[in-house]
Image: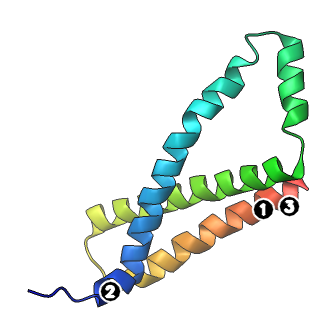
Amino acid sequence: MRLDPRPRSHPTYVAFLVHRISGLLLALFLPLHFWALSQAINGEAALEGFLRWTDNAVLKAAETMLVVLLAAHLAGGLRVLALEFLGWRSSQKTLVAASAGVSLAAGLLFLLNVV
């Protein structure tokens, strides 16, 4: 039995992958986030040193990607909830495009505010 490769190029499959991969990347980021928060426990000097270290272009770009990942995961989750409660609709491609647009817009707005 040979599987048809076309479903993997369908926009909803790509949305599924983006949702899963963004969730995994956010889960990998979480320990780093907790470590960064723990710098406040070590004192004001440790936190200030960490915050100074984070004020560079590479980390600002990573921060923007983090916001895009958060927005993509949120938008993908809302799309899945809509699918659960509203059922399959022929406009699924439109929902995928809208969720991608919302994610990129959130990242762009964050980037404009950071710069």
Residue at disc 2, secondary structure: loop
Give the CA separation, mark 1 to mark 2: 30 Å
Disc 2/disc 3 C-alpha distance (Å):
35 Å
Cβ–Cβ under 8 Å for marks 1 and 2: no
Q: Residues within 10 Å of mark 2 (few under 14, many from 20)?
A: few
Which quadrant of the rendered structure holds the C terminus? bottom right
Q: Nearer the viewer, residue 50 or 37?
A: 50
Is 93 left or right of 40, judged from the image as shown?
A: left
Image vertical order of residue 88 relative to residue 65, above or below = below
- Residue 90's label in the rendered image is 2
Which numbered tag is attached to residue 112? Answer: 3
Residue type at mark 1? Leu
- Residue 89 placement, left or right of 58: left
Amino acid found under the numbered disc labelled 3: Leu
Between label 2 and label 3, give the one nearer the viewer: 3
Please state the horizontal and vertical placement of residue 81, each as a whole percent of the image.
35, 59
Up/down of 89 relative to 85, above or below: below
The residue carrying pointer 3 sits among few (fewer than 14), some (14 to 19) or many (20 or more) residues within 10 Å by Cα, namely: few
Callout 3–callout 1 Cβ contact below 8 Å: yes
Location of mark 1 (residue): 109
**Res. 11 mark:** none
Element at badge 1?
helix
Q: Position of residue 67 (x, y in %)?
A: 67, 53
The picture places residue 32, in percent across and down from the top left corner, at: 63, 33
Q: Is residue 38 left or right of residue 99?
A: right
